[in-house]
Image (cartoon, rainbow, N blue to C red):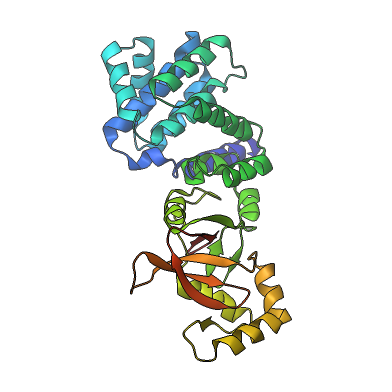
Amino acid sequence: MAKLKELLQKVKKETLSFQKHPCREIEEEMRIHYLNGLALMAMADDHICDKEKEYLWILVKSFGFQEEMLESVIEFAQNPDEDLIQEIIESFATKDIKYNFMIDCMMISSRDGHYDESKEEIIKEFFEMLKITEKESEDLKDIFEMFYTQDVNTLYRYFTGNEYMKVVELFEYLIEYYQMNTAYERLTESMPFFDGLMWTKESKEMTWYEAMEYAKNLRLGGYSDWRLPTVDELKEVVRSCGGTPVNLNDKDHQSIWDKNMANSSYQSCYDAKGFTSGGYWSSSPYVSDTSNAWNVFFLYGDDDWDDKSATDLVRCVRDSQ
């Protein structure tokens, strides 16, 4: 009874985890290519062991195929076709799924408990053929090691610190498979969340043009939907901290500036939320002159416009946790 319960729990874990594999969303032919490529990797030492077959079987089931597909990919690995190998490489080379493929290659290679030279050579060949840069290759090896050793703290720091690397959603199935999801979610909660938005922690200096491009390409905390806040969202921080938003054109703007600067509770609040007293870019253009955009200076609590080529501070936001 105990063994049956253990088996059922294992099947449940595998089924739930690998439902999040990105390959489930791609066309059938590419899913087959993916499985054929992994079977080739498992065959690197001229033998596919039971544990490697087990990993292939998990993926076969998760990708919506039957047992016949497992037999088919193993047969392909034992008698590989050169043209089909080239087709596999070409189908992945320009797509993000190649990063998952390489992680799964390393995962399946380690299933038998050792990672020998023959497997390492095939891994290296795949990196080169898929046009994965040396930096990305090293990063993927690091990610594999973090999953293999279940080092959730280093994994979290890695995804929040490497802005260029692909988002954590690509590897969410492995976070769940290795039962790291609860710890990872707890760490993710440390991303600042206030006034209905998640914010990046650090303030960076750049022009408005650089800021818009930076937000567009930002990959941080496992998310890729970062953007610049609107001017109204920045003003809401002033308001929620007990300050009074003000514009240079307001008749009594000087007295409101003085009031905000003298309001120690307001000054402490925006500081606690991670802002400095300087001006922060918004995504909102200045309608009367599109070479300018709105920003908000927290010291005074005022919104103003500045030339888009000028340097101001930047914090990005996203709309949900």
In the picture, which quadrant includes the N terminus?
top right
Instruction: Name the one closer to the observer, 133 or 321.
Output: 133
Of residues 292 and 55, the one drawn nearer to the viewer in this rendering: 292
- Which residue is painted at 34% across and 29% down in the image? 92
Could you tell whether 256 is left or right of 63 in the image? right
- The reply to whether residue 50 is in sight is yes
Residue at left 57%, top 58%? 200
**Residue placed at 55% from the left, 31% from the top?**
139
Counting from the top left corner in percent of width and height, residue 297 is at: 57, 72
Write down the quadrant of residue 275 in the picture.
bottom right
In the picture, measured across the screen, residue 183 lies left or right of residue 144, that is right
Residue 114, image x and y in percent?
Answer: 61, 16
The answer to whether residue 70 shows anywhere in this view is: no
Front-most of residues 124 and 115: 124
Residue 138: x and y in percent read 56, 27
Q: Closer to the camera, 310 or 121?
A: 310
Horizontal and vertical percent position of residue 65: 34, 34
Looking at the picture, does residue 186 appear above or below residue 233?
above
Q: How many marks?
A: 0
Question: Where, by quadrant of the figure, is residue 130 drawn?
Answer: top left
Q: Is residue 203 left or right of residue 90?
A: right
**38 over 61 or under it: above or below:** above
The residue lying at 34 percent from left, 70 percent from top is 289
